[in-house]
Amino acid sequence: MNFRNTLLPTCILALFVYYLHITALREHLYFHHWWFHMIIHVLTGAVLALATLYIYAGISSRKGESFTKLAAVALPFVLLCAVGWEIFELMTGLIYITGTDYTIDTTKGIFTGLAGGLFGISYAHFIHKRTS
């Protein structure tokens, strides 16, 4: 499966996420708007899924691999990254809430990352169908 048509949108989205993150740090948007980091989680999940699809499809020796199998690689990778990020936040002290609120925030972060991953996979599927 060829995902060359998704490389440019993936790179543009990654740069946009980077810009939003830097702006959020500079302007303290993560602290002023409780919902802002959810947007970053969704967009980052989409970038991770798109990048995974692009890379895995490019190195896969099975060129006729179905989209479902490719998505079955991308979504667990997004989950792994989301869980890894939450562990990183915990280990480095980047969390500012405790108790039940922390558990809820972590769960929301993981699920919004997965939602972004599903969006990225759906977008890649749409682009692939449109161009093939």
Image: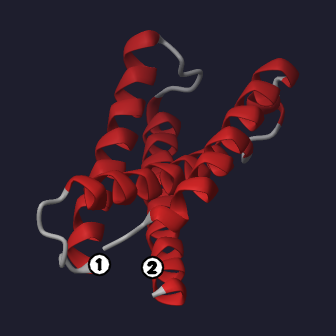
> Which residue is rendered at x = 53% and y = 38% of the image?
101
Q: Is residue 115 visible?
A: no
Residue 82 image offset from top left, x and y in percent: 39, 42
Q: Is residue 57 left or right of residue 64?
A: right
Residue 54 lies, in percent from the top left, at: 39, 57
Report the quarter where the N terminus lies.
bottom left
Q: Tell me the SS state at disc 2.
A: helix
Point out residue 95 in the picture as x, y percentages from the top left corner. 53, 22
- Tell me: residue 7, above or below residue 2: above
Seen in the picture, residue 29 relative to 104 is either above or below; the reply is above
Identified by mark 1, the residue type is: Phe
- Horizontal and vertical percent position of residue 11: 60, 46
Q: Are marks 1 and 2 in contact (CB under 8 Å)?
A: yes
Which mark, by number, is residue 22? none
Q: Which residue is mark 1?
A: 67
- The residue identified by callout 2 is 125
* 22 lies above or below 78: above
> Which of the 4 image quarters holds residue 85?
top left
- Left or right of 73? Residue 21 is right
SS state under label 1: helix
- Here the colouring is secondary structure
Q: Alpha-carbon neighbours of circle 2 within 10 Å: few (<14), some, or many (≥20)?
A: some
Residue 124 at least partly seen: yes
Task: Identify the residue at image location x=50%, y=46%.
Answer: 109
**Residue 53 as seen in the image, left or right of residue 104:** left
Q: Is residue 81 left or right of residue 22?
A: left
Specify the amino acid type for callout 2: His
Tell which residue pokes out farthest to the top in this image: 92
> Which quadrant: the C terminus?
bottom left
Of residue 100 and residue 75, the one placed in the foreground of this image is: 75
Disc with the residue nearer the chain's start (1 vs 2): 1
Q: Nearer the viewer, residue 13 or 96?
A: 13
